[in-house]
Amino acid sequence: MDIDMDYERPNVETIKCVVVGDNAVGKTRLICARACNTTLTQYQLLATHVPTVWAIDQYRVCQEVLERSRDVVDEVSVSLRLWDTFGDHHKDRRFAYGRSDVVVLCFSIANPNSLNHVKTMWYQEIKHFCPRTPVILVGCQLDLRYADLEAVNRARRPLARPIKRGDILPPERGREVAKELGIPYYETSVFDQFGIKDVFDNAIRAALISRRHLQFWKSHLKKVQKPLLQAPFLPPKAPPPVIKIPECPTPNMNEAGYLLDSPLCADVMFVLQEQDCIFAHKIYLATSSSKFYDLFLMECEESPYLDEIQCNKENTNKDVLTSHLETNSDTDEASLKSLDVKIPPPESSESLNMLEPESGETNSAARSLSCWGKGFVSVHKEMQVNPVSKRTCPVTVVKMDSSVQAAPFKTVLQFLYTGQLDENEKDLTRLAQIAEILEVFDLRMMVENIMNKEAFMNQEITKAFHVRKANRIKECLCKGTFSDVTFKLDDGSIKAHKPLLICSCEWMSAMFGGSFIESSNSEVALPNINKTSMQAVLDYLYTKQLSSSQELDTLELIALANRFCLPHLIALAEQHAVQELTKASMSGVAIDGEVLSYLELAQFHNANQLAAWCLHYICTNYNSVCSKFRKEIKAKSSDNQEYFERHRWPPVWYLKEEDHYQRVKKEREKEDVALNKHHSKRKWCFWNSSAVVA
């Protein structure tokens, strides 16, 4: 059979290679990588270790294994037979050493004890059972030298001893032991498929040289070299961290609905059937309904006149009004009429009595809406006490027709706030009528679908509703329409809308919804903030998208987003910054200095993903960055400098190994040149003496 032919073929050297070492150092996986071309994932390598041994009879039962055992080293055909051993079966292991041609002694670079056992136990055992057999020292699991040990320890079994940074042995430790024992030293990584061929090819060379000393008549062994040097392993560059964008916080419809039930910052009040009052917010209604948009836009055209009345009331006329209110009612009415201010008629309902204007508050002239639209009676502006904040503020009062009932009207408003409709709504017919009167056609269609048992069609209507609403919100932000607050910034001012800010940002909700003075002010000063960054933040709060511009400073935006507690915006800004830096780097622009300036600012403002990207860039380009910005590198925090030293690429141990490799390589080249000169001189003397004899 062909399986038995290797022992009978002329000029085919069969090499028995015994692999020994401590348990769990990677002996069997190293053998499988050579004999079976096995590749393992990091997850498989980190799985729970089960003591195994690779069976030698694989060469008899598996043709592929036998084919892979055949090789040619230095023009010598060989058949390599690998013998695996248990690390703790001391009595049985002595049989494996018999007639061995070479022994591969393994240890783990992540286990210092396994290297200590090389000197104290394994080498002595080898020399006891096979004193003349050459030995090769191999450091396994090289990939752990540059791996993320925290991730490695998390992936290992729960009760496994964690690998510490101090456990990782540098290459010189293994080389020192090999030099002390007088044997070659190599390193391997099954995960990276590095050093496997180096180990076994040089093990074959060591075995053939030993055999050449005993079988000197075999001429085909004359070209066998002594074990070669191994070039150091350059670990791959770590991939740059991917900026992960957390799930976008969807607009909280419950908060919008709660804002309707708890009318914080309300600027419009609907009066229904002369007794029911419902507070609402212009920005929510105007961006959801064209009818309300036109109504409030028409009312805003008169706002300069109303604002002038309010300003006069607050400044020059406050004392006059107070003095008139202390006299009889006729004088009060005459005085207020002289200021062109209308007094609202007294209401019998308790709810309206609670919301009557305070002493000295002014009302604007009511404007009739009977010809403008069905369901509307009049609109005017007056000062009212907000039932939540208990503060007096101007409110647009819209009086509805008596046919509009409170319950279905409240449902319509709920839809305009949230875009949602409860399928179990009781009075759908009445709701459809009011939706038709108010020209809320989306709601009208949804009610009709529910009544026709086609509620599944409402999803598309809801999507279209939210798209239109988002576009109109963005338009209102750009134009400042229906704004109720102005942010005073370092380089200008921006108008905004308190209700939208309250529902989209907890920081804004605390400022405008709490007891802070800003909740009642129409102007809010925000120092140390520029207009471009604030505009980007407002765009995000309104649309949940980052609208970048050339003037936008990403770091300032990150600082502002961190100040407003907006982690999703921070992630978007981080992604934008990384994209811009990567684009500049690929176009040939030097970004080393910019990355250095980004690093600690990103760490300070909790932009951890951007900081991780900056650390990765500095580490993978450490030599070039350090040569240009040595002072800046030294000025970084101790934690950052420690990170640089640990993760720099190429790593320090590789640079040392590369220097050692080049130095020893030159020494060997000199030795080879001297040896070749010696051989050539001997040949010249031989031919010269022959000529003389002739």
Image (cartoon, helix red, strand yellow):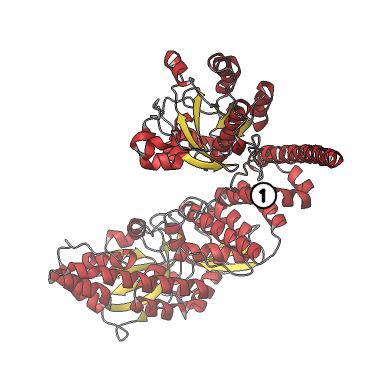
43 vs 403, left or right, is: right
User: Can residue 98 be seen at all in this image of the molecule?
Assistant: yes
Which residue extends farthest front? 694
Does dot 1 land on a helix, a strand or a loop? helix
- The correct choice, above or below, for 510 with respect to 41 in the image is below
Q: Nearer the viewer, residue 85 or 353?
A: 85
Q: Residues within 10 Å of mark 1 (few under 14, many from 20)?
A: many
- The correct choice, above or below, for 506 with respect to 344 in the image is above
Q: Nearer the viewer, residue 38 or 422?
A: 38
Q: How many marks?
A: 1
Q: Which residue is mark 1?
A: 618
Which residue extends farthest right? 692
Residue 692 drawn at (x, y percent): 87, 40
Residue 390 drawn at (x, y percent): 43, 55
Image quarter hosting the N terminus: top left
- The correct choice, above or below, for 237 with respect to 290 in the image is above
Residue 8 drawn at (x, y percent): 44, 34
User: Can residue 33 be seen at all in this image of the molecule?
Assistant: no
Q: Nearer the viewer, residue 415 or 23?
A: 23
The answer to which image quadrant residue 186 occupies is: top right
What residue is at 20 percent from the left and 67 percent from the top?
456
Image quarter hosting the C terminus: top right
Query: Label 1 amino acid?
Result: Ile
162 vs 176, left or right, is: left
Residue 474 drawn at (x, y percent): 46, 72
- The correct choice, above or below, for 492 with respect to 374 in the image is above
Which residue extends farthest bottom? 371
The answer to which image quadrant residue 294 occupies is: bottom left
What residue is at 46 percent from the left and 31 percent from the top?
82
Q: Nearer the viewer, residue 266 or 291?
A: 291
